[in-house]
């Protein structure tokens, strides 16, 4: 689920959403990112944009990313000048590890800052409750963690079930 912050939005979670996005931005320090800028389409949505690398796209290690007020600041390696952009809207996709920045100064532009590789969300379960049900040749493995109120269901074909059994020994 994306976290969206928009300036002047009456959303009750606006401050919390901005804090989440600010934390994500600050945590980029020292990481390699991709920086891609596109024109917002007149028809359609940002989701329809082609985010494949283009001539002026950049990949660099971001240095000291931070937020002051609602402005995002950062540096590039080998550059002394601090850069900044003030957004009117921010949209964080935590699963894909990408932030869409809509700059106040360029209303027709969106910037996508992303980690170049997909980062998988990890969940650690210490006291799992396991269950297996089989229907029509498929097995459904259910893993629950009561303390975290988490349930994971994994559908396994007969081949994947045999592979799992083999890996478990």
Image (tube, helix red, strand yellow):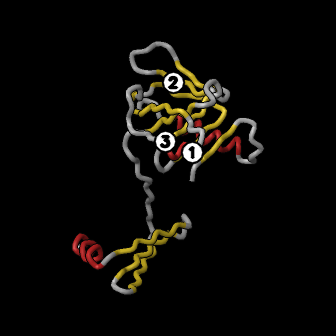
Query: Label 3: which residue?
Result: 49
Query: Label 2: which residue?
Result: 74
Residue 124 image label? none
**Image quadrant where one finds the C terminus:** bottom left
Residue most extreme to the right: 10
Please give the name of the residue rendered at 35% of the width and 75% of the height, measured from the top-left corner. Answer: 156
- Expressed as whole percent of the image width and height from the top left, the position of residue 128 reads 44, 71
Of the image marks 1 and 2, the number of the one nearer the N terminus = 1
- Eyeballing the image, is 91 above or below 155? above
Please give the name of the residue rendered at 50% of the width and 46% of the height, measured from the top-left corner. Answer: 48
- Expressed as whole percent of the image width and height from the top left, the position of residue 14 reads 70, 43
The answer to whether the residue labelled 3 contacts the one labelled 1, judged by CB atoms less than 8 Å apart, is no
Query: Label 1: which residue?
Result: 45
Q: Quadrant of residue 79?
A: top left
Please give the name of the residue rendered at 38% of the width and 35% of the height, measured from the top-left corner. Answer: 53
* Residue 10 horizontal side relative to residue 115, left or right: right
Q: Is mark 1 on a helix, strand or loop?
A: loop
Between 12 and 137, the residue placed more toward the observer is 137
């Amino acid at each position: 689920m994306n976290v969206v912050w928009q300036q002047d939005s009456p959303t009750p979670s606006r401050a919390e959403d901005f804090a989440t996005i600010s934390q994500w931005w600050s945590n980029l320090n020292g990481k390699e990112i991709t920086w891609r800028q596109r024109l917002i389409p007149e028809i359609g949505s940002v989701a329809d944009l082609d985010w494949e690398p283009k001539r002026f796209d950049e990949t660099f290690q971001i240095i000291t990313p931070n937020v002051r007020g609602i402005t995002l600041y950062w540096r590039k390696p080998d550059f002394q000048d601090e850069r900044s952009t003030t957004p009117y809207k921010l949209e964080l996709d935590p699963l894909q590890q990408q932030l869409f920045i809509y700059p106040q100064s360029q209303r027709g532009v969106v910037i996508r800052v992303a980690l170049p590789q997909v980062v998988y969300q990890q969940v650690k379960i210490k006291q799992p409750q396991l269950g297996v049900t089989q229907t029509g040749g498929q097995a459904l493995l259910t893993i629950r963690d009561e303390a975290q109120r988490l349930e994971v269901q994994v559908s396994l074909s007969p081949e994947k079930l045999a592979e799992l059994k083999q890996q478990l020994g």
